[in-house]
Image: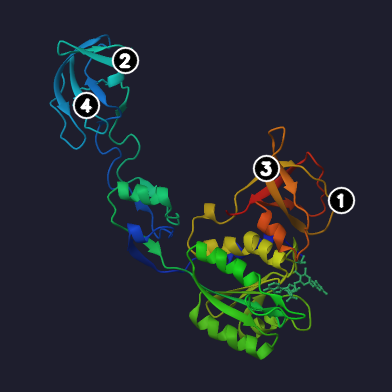
Amino acid sequence: MLDFNTARQQLLDTHACTLGSANLALAEAANRILAAPLPAQYPSPMFDNSAMDGYAVCDTQGRLKDFTVISRVQAGECAAAPLQHGEAVRIFTGAPLPENTTAVVPQEQTEIENGALHILADIAPGQHMRLRAEEIEVGQELLAQGSKLNAAALGLAASQGYKNVPVYEKLKVIVFSSGNEIIEPGEPAAEGKIYDANRYQLIAWLKTRGAEVMDGGILPDDLSRTETALGYAAKKFDVIITSGGASVGEADYLKQAIENVGTLTTHTLAIKPGKPFAWGSIGNTKVFILPGNPVATFVTAHMLLFPVLNKLMGKYPRYWNLPNFTVKAAFDTRKAIKRREFLRVCVEVDDAGETVAVLLPNQGSAMLSTCARANALCEVPPGETVAAGQHVKVHILPT
Ligand SMILES: Nc1nc2c(c(=O)[nH]1)N[C@H]1C(S)=C(S)[C@@H](COP(=O)(O)OP(=O)(O)OC[C@H]3O[C@@H](n4cnc5c(N)ncnc54)[C@H](O)[C@@H]3O)O[C@H]1N2
Ligand code: MOO
């Protein structure tokens, strides 16, 4: 059996982003992936400016309490003439500081008496002054290639005057389910048949991650029809994802079909659930075969497939895997197993105010309701058990 970490590393090492790129207007680029590093075009701040509504003062010795106000400057105007010792300018947040400003005093700490400014508080040199380039220098990398253009990233690009940004094209993915027992939600329930759960889980993740997704429908347990469908899909898509038919049953045709029209890397993975996860290719199209049990699909998708899809989409390595940390377990497990197990848990704050992982009931591979309630997967290494109070690793599921 292949260890989970080895399998994930092998998957990541053997897949790379080959997507082209295009320049998109900022408003169109939300949630897309940046295809080249974005350098700073301007310093930030662009000019010395005030962080408060108040007075910019010049006090070369740092002892004065009284100043002569010589002018007034608002945001959007040019800086006032340079200050001399003992002079001040009425100023507003974001307005350029005159040369020789030594501090900005908020208006709440001042009073005007007979036209002269009197300061009511101590002044620290440099207070409330935002200095040119103190945050960002021209040419500095603003955003790394592979950054997700989320709200903050797009705001930052806009703050630097970018109208367009280079983004990767969308990854084109087709998702199939397989098995004669699988029927489409909406069809009448029938004896021996079950509704398709896997395609809907996978498509949901792909859509929210900005892939171009096609619903491939349900493949019957038929080798030649499976081969034809996969061969056709490989001409049009970057990635083919299937679930079911991955194991050793007589009607499990998927692996055979892929071997016949492409290449397949099969392993028995030391992961529970999800042992029959496999991958391969048909021409340049990458193929991922997920086990049919809905929880095995869920776990292998989050722990193996999505990391490699994130990489294929061009994302920066920090985004590949689910974030993880360690917390105290609020549960015990009885029996050690040879496979690395991923239990569905809720990470929550207990009555003592401590963050703990609570094991959810119904951990069977077909029990998808537990996945819908969990907010994390708790990793139990092979051969180990968990005792309450012990620290365990949890992988936080996307919201
Ligand atoms: N003799 C053995 N039997 C099984 C083994 C094994 O090693 N030896 N492995 C078990 C494990 S572990 C898993 S996981 C499953 C995976 O098998 P397959 O990938 O071939 O999946 P199927 O047999 O097609 O289906 C398994 C199970 O999942 C249901 N299913 C399938 N697709 C869907 C779907 N789209 N939506 C909802 N449910 C689905 C299917 O009806 C079966 O109940 O094999 C074990 N067997
Ligand atoms: O991978 Mo299977 O889900 O352990 O049952």
- Mark 4–mark 3 Cα distance, whole angstroms, equals 48 Å
Q: Is residue 288 left or right of residue 293?
A: left
The secondary structure type at the circle numbered 2 is loop
Q: The disc labelled 1 sits on which kind of residue?
A: Arg
Earlier in the chain: of badge 3 and badge 1, it is: 1
- Mark 3–mark 1 Cα distance, whole angstroms, equals 22 Å
Q: Quadrant of residue 228?
A: bottom right
Question: Badges 3 and 1: C-beta atoms under 8 Å apart?
Answer: no
The secondary structure type at the circle numbered 3 is strand
Q: Residue at x 37, y 52 (%)?
A: 154
The nearer-to-camera label among 2 and 3 is: 3
Earlier in the chain: of badge 2 and badge 3, it is: 2
Q: Residue at x 21, y 32 (%)?
A: 96
For the N terminus, the image quarter is bottom right
Earlier in the chain: of badge 2 and badge 1, it is: 2
Q: Badge 4 is on which residue?
A: 91
Q: Badge 3 is on which residue?
A: 348
Q: The disc labelled 4 sits on which kind of residue?
A: Ile
Other residues around mark 1 within 10 Å, as few (<14) / some (14–19) / many (≥20): few
105 is higher (above) or lower (below) than 381: above
Other residues around mark 4 within 10 Å, as few (<14) / some (14–19) / many (≥20): many
Q: Badge 1 is on which residue?
A: 334
Q: Residue at x 38, y 58 (%)?
A: 36
Q: Depth check: give the residue in front, 202 or 286.
A: 202
Q: Quadrant of residue 356?
A: top right
The secondary structure type at the circle numbered 1 is loop
Give ligand 2's quarter of the image. bottom right
Q: Badge 2 is on which residue?
A: 123
Q: Is residue 160 left or right of residue 68?
A: right
